Amino acid sequence: MIKNLSQLKKYCANHPYFEIVAHCRPECIGQIRKVNVVDTTGFYSIIPDDPNAKATLANRGKGSYLEWSKAPFWKFENNVASIYSSDKKTDDSLILSMAFKLM
């Protein structure tokens, strides 16, 4: 179970798949993504079944980018990692919630 940002960073280094269960852009909800590239500042994710998707082709094929941000902006619950634009963690400040299936 992922309980904090440090664990999430380590887990993402293994290039896992995740489902977007909430997003500030509703059209992204339900997408299955794969962590493609990870570095110290964040990670890039692609839609593995759609090589021509805008999210997959973004950033010269690395995929869509998500910055790690600071730990107070994250919430972890039942293998769902959520990032907010504020440490208040309100529905209005939600950027993205990702559900990970841990192996």
Image (cartoon, grey):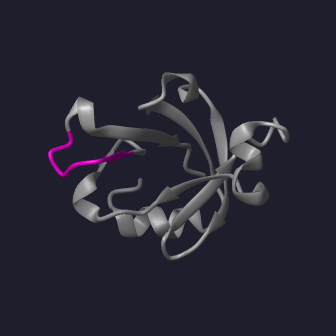
Q: Which residues fall within the magenta stretch?
A: 82-89
Above or below, 36 relative to 79: below
Choose top left, top right, bottom left or bottom right for residue 89.
top left
**Image point (41%, 53%), residue name:** 1
Q: Decide which of 14, 82 is in the foreground and name it.
A: 82
Q: Residue furthest left?
A: 88
Compared across the picture, whether 6 is left or right of 20 comes to: left
Nearer to us in this view, 35 or 85: 85
Q: Main secondary structure of the magenta part?
A: loop
> Where residue 43 sits: x, y (%)?
57, 62
Residue at (53, 26) in percent of width and height: 29
| Residue 83 place in picture, x, y as percent | 35, 48
Residue positioned 44% across, 32% down in the render? 23
Camera-side residue of 22 and 95: 95
Which residue is found at the position 22% from the left and 49% from the top? 86
Whether residue 79 is visible here, answered yes or no, is: yes
- The percent position of residue 36, horizontal first and vertical second, equals 70, 59
